[in-house]
Image (tube, rainbow, N blue to C red):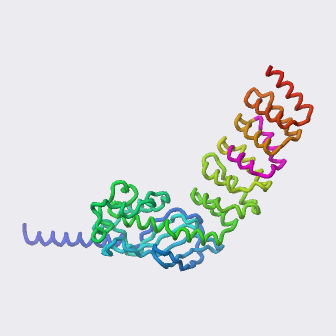
């Protein structure tokens, strides 16, 4: 091979090396950002710093609150600087973590030129950043129950010598971390769901109002809705729009959310009682049962609710009929109008329904000629 050809090959190799380095630098020249949907998609008008004592986690640090022009907390964030090794010799973790106003994980951002690394300081790939964001979004991850020692097999751990990035990872936790970056994953998850989340909830609750709750309930995230529903009680009685929104979320396909809503709703308000009655008519038996159990706790039922229930009786299935009749019995509803509607059920082809109507009427003892006539006819058929 000629000297000229060798020189050309050397120059080409040098060019490719420099091009590769410049390509890598350009990849990390811009901030690396991974975000999930915002709870409130509002422009940020200002940022308010709060000095917070996070105690053993990081000590005193600044938590920033991003606020909209209307005064709604749009997001929160913290600048994180932390070693990802026990011996302090590994790469420093420098990142900004973000939360939604409900304390839900929102995303992370790395400063210009920074990147997350794995074993031997290999940078994360885009796929690994995406996976990391998914892991951080899982509030129920088993990482919440693991200790650091659970991440690394005991035989491989000498905490004075082995760092938390390059140590081999226990097989049963591999599904919950980025391979080669066990401690980075672990540390970030615990920062997301540690004391910061509680501080965020406290700050948001200080600005909580019916209007803010309405905005949060528009979120597509179930966790956001659950968070808001657990806090509606002080506001809902005086706010019709909030009542309507919350009741509209009672649906068959969201049983846990519906259960939480029914638990939180007061039963003293006539509008809420009517909303519950309408929700009863629209949903399946599981939701119907929850609503009836809730209404049993009410001091009384409004005439409108009683009328809605009794008018719906002919179109309901047996168990739903039984639930309503039990509710009316407990609330001692024994007016003739309601009684006559129930007496009509004595002619039902469904013997279970007819028998439930009979039991109700004989126990309530409503003095009405029409009811007595229907009871007599039913009794004669049973002989």
For the view shown, which residue lies furthest in the front direction? 363
Percent from the top left, x then y, of residue 235? 72, 64
Is most of the magenta stretch helix, strand or loop?
helix
Q: Would you say residue 265 is visible in this rendering?
A: yes
Percent from the top left, x then y, of residue 291? 70, 47
- In the rendered image, residue 302 lying in the magenta stretch gets the answer yes
Q: Is residue 110 above or below residue 141?
A: below
Determine whether, in the image, residue 32 is placed left or right of residue 122: right
Q: Is residue 66 above or below residue 130?
A: below
Percent from the top left, x then y, of residue 304? 83, 48
- In the rendered image, residue 46 lying in the magenta stretch gets the answer no
First to last magenta residue range: 289-314
Query: Which residue is located at x 51 percent, y 73 percent?
Result: 77
Percent from the top left, x then y, of residue 326? 76, 40
Task: Decide which of 250, 52 is in the foreground and name it.
Answer: 52
Task: Locate the N terminus and report the quarter of the image it occupies.
Answer: bottom left
Query: Which residue is located at x 80 percent, y 19 percent?
Result: 383
Image-quadrant location for residue 224: bottom right
Image-quadrant location for residue 313: top right
Q: Would you say residue 28 is visible in this rendering?
A: no
For the view shown, which residue lies furthest in the top direction? 383
Task: Decide which of 272, 41 is in the foreground and name it.
Answer: 272
Query: Which residue is located at x 55 percent, y 64 percent?
Result: 38
């Amino acid at each position: 091979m000629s000297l000229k050809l060798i020189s050309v090959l050397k120059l080409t190799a040098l060019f490719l090396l420099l091009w590769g380095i410049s390509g890598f630098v350009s990849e990390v020249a811009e901030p690396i950002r991974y975000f999930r949907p915002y709870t409130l998609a509002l422009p940020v008008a200002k940022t308010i710093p709060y000095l917070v004592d996070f105690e053993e986690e990081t000590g005193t640090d600044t938590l920033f609150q991003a606020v909209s022009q209307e005064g709604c907390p749009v997001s929160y964030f913290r600048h994180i600087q932390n070693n990802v090794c026990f011996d302090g010799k590994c790469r420093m973790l420098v990142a900004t973590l973000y939360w939604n106003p409900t304390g839900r994980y929102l995303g992370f951002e790395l400063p210009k030129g920074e990147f997350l690394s794995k074993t031997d300081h290999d940078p994360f790939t885009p796929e690994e950043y995406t996976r990391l964001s998914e892991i951080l979004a899982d509030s129920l991850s088993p990482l919440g129950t693991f200790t650091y020692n659970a991440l690394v097999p005991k035989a491989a751990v000498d905490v004075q010598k082995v760092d938390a990035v390059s140590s081999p990872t226990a097989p049963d936790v591999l599904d919950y971390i980025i391979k080669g970056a066990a401690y980075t994953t672990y540390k970030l998850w615990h920062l997301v769901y540690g004391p910061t989340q509680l501080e965020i909830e406290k700050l948001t609750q200080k600005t909580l109002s019916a209007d803010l709750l309405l905005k949060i309930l528009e979120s597509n995230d179930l966790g956001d809705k659950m968070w808001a529903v657990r806090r509606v009680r002080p506001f809902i009685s005086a706010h019709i729009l909030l009542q309507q929104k919350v009741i509209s979320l009672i649906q068959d396909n969201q049983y846990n959310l519906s259960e939480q809503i029914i638990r939180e709703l007061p039963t003293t308000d006539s509008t809420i009682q009517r909303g519950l009655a309408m929700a009863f008519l629209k949903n399946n038996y599981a939701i119907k049962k929850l609503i009836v159990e809730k209404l049993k706790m009410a001091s009384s039922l409004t005439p409108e609710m009683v009328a809605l229930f009794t008018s719906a009786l002919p179109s309901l299935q047996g168990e739903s009929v039984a639930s309503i009749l039990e509710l009316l019995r407990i609330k001692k509803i024994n007016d003739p109008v309601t009684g006559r509607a129930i007496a009509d059920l004595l002619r039902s082809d469904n013997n279970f329904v007819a028998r439930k109507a009979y039991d109700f009427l004989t126990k309530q003892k409503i003095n009405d000629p029409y009811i007595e006539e229907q009871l007599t006819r039913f009794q004669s058929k049973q002989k």
